[in-house]
Image: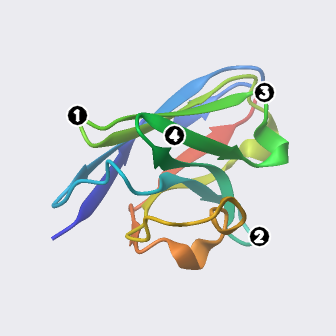
Amino acid sequence: QVQLVESGGGLVQPGGSLRLSCTASGRSFSNYPMGWFRQAPGKERESVATTRWIGGSAYQKVYADSVKGRFTISRDNAKNTVSLQMNSLKPEDTAVYYCVASSIRGLTTGAMPNTGNYDYWGQGTQVTVSS
């Protein structure tokens, strides 16, 4: 049984930083897309950052425009984990953040932000940015 377990959410002031981590169990996702989505109250779930294997030891990273330059996604395949370093946080980053993984190895760049392409979801972790 595949499980994704997130950690690291919490309350932070604007301009602060948080690091989210996600550990997958039940199978390896080394060569499969993983990432982070979020959902704010009253809004649709959206992609934040995703990463996919593109051959050899290379991985592509795709970020939402709203987080480019502030958030960094990384993965440790040996530990089956994916992390999201969030800097310069803004109140509009407040949301429940979900770790995701896909069983579709060949996702294209354009398909990576689509929620329907991810089979596995974590339970979500709350991030609140407020003074």
Q: Nearer the viewer, mark 3 or mark 2?
A: 3
User: Circle 2 sits in a helix, a strand or a loop, which is it?
Assistant: loop
**Disc 1 + disc 4, Cβ < 8 Å:** no
How much space separates mark 3 and mark 1, taking CA atoms? 26 Å
The residue carrying mark 4 is: 59
> Which-is-in-front pick, marks 2 and 4?
4
Q: Is residue 92 shown left or right of residue 35?
A: right
Question: Which residue, given by chain and number where applicable, does mark 2 sit on?
Answer: 43
**Residue beneath label 3, please?**
69
Asked if the residues shown at circle 2 and circle 4 are in contact, with their CB atoms under 8 angstroms apart, the answer is no
Q: What is the C-alpha distance between the residues marked 1 and 2?
A: 35 Å
Tag 3's secondary structure? loop
Q: Counting other residues with Cα less than 10 Å from the Cα at mark 1, is it few (<14), some (14-19), or many (20 or more)?
A: few
Which amino acid is tagged 4? Answer: Tyr
Gap in angstroms between the C-alphas marked 3 and 4: 18 Å
Left or right: where 46 falls relative to 18: right
**Which of the pair 96/122 is nearer the observer?**
122
| Relative depth, front residue between 20 and 76 | 76
In space, the residues marked 1 and 4 are separated at their CA atoms by 15 Å
Q: Mark 1 vs mark 2: which is more N-terminal?
A: 2
Mark found first going from the N terminus, 3 or 4: 4
Q: Secondary structure at mark 1?
A: loop
Q: Residue at x 72, y 64 (%)?
A: 110
Q: Amino acid at mark 2?
A: Lys
Identify residue type, mark 3. Gly
